[in-house]
Amino acid sequence: MSRLDHRLEPEGEVRRFEVITGAIGRRRWNADDRARILEETLVPGAVVSEVARRHGLMPQQLFTWRREARKAAQTLPAFVPAVVTPEPVLAAEPPAVSPRRKRRSRQHRRAAAIEIDVAGVKVTIENGASPATIAAVLGALKVGS
């Protein structure tokens, strides 16, 4: 028999006996530790293998964490809630206008207004609207239809 054969009874005395206690299995890293280790890999000039070795990890594990972090960042919501606050109304009084002149300005305003009816919804763009506002309204209608 060769020396490589396994024997049930060792030749001679056992010099070292190792007892492993504690939980056996995979280590669990909490989110804070993962984030801290991942930040180390993102420093310019950092070598992932060295960072992994320093923390007792395999480089593959760090690359997996980096890939998972990239995927999580890409799946963030694309839209954020919009908050619209009304503009404060100024308490200034309009200049005194004769009733005849007032009537004419209303008719003029109506004649210059743009009214669009889409699927039962009426949109009115008043006289004096900026080209950017008109383009935004038309763009929104185009997207919505």
Image (tube, rainbow, N blue to C red):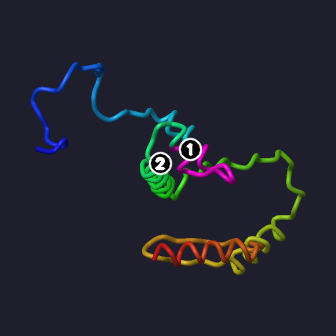
The span shown in magenta is: 38-52
| Number of numbered discs overlaid on the protein picture | 2
Q: Nearer the viewer, mark 1 or mark 2?
A: 1
Quarter of the N terminus within the rendering? top left
Q: Main structural element of the magenta stretch: helix, strand or loop?
A: helix
Is residue 39 shown in magenta? yes
Q: Which residue is mark 1?
A: 51
- The residue lying at 68 percent from left, 48 percent from top is 86
Give 113 or 142, whichever is nearer the viewer.
142
Amino acid on which the number 2 mark rests in the picture: Leu
Of callouts 1 and 2, the N-terminal one: 1
Task: Determine contact: label 1, label 2, CB under 8 Å.
Answer: yes
Q: Which residue is mark 2?
A: 62
Q: Quadrant of residue 104?
A: bottom right
- 23 relative position to 1: left or right: right
| SS at badge 1 | helix
Q: Is residue 3 above or below residue 121?
A: above
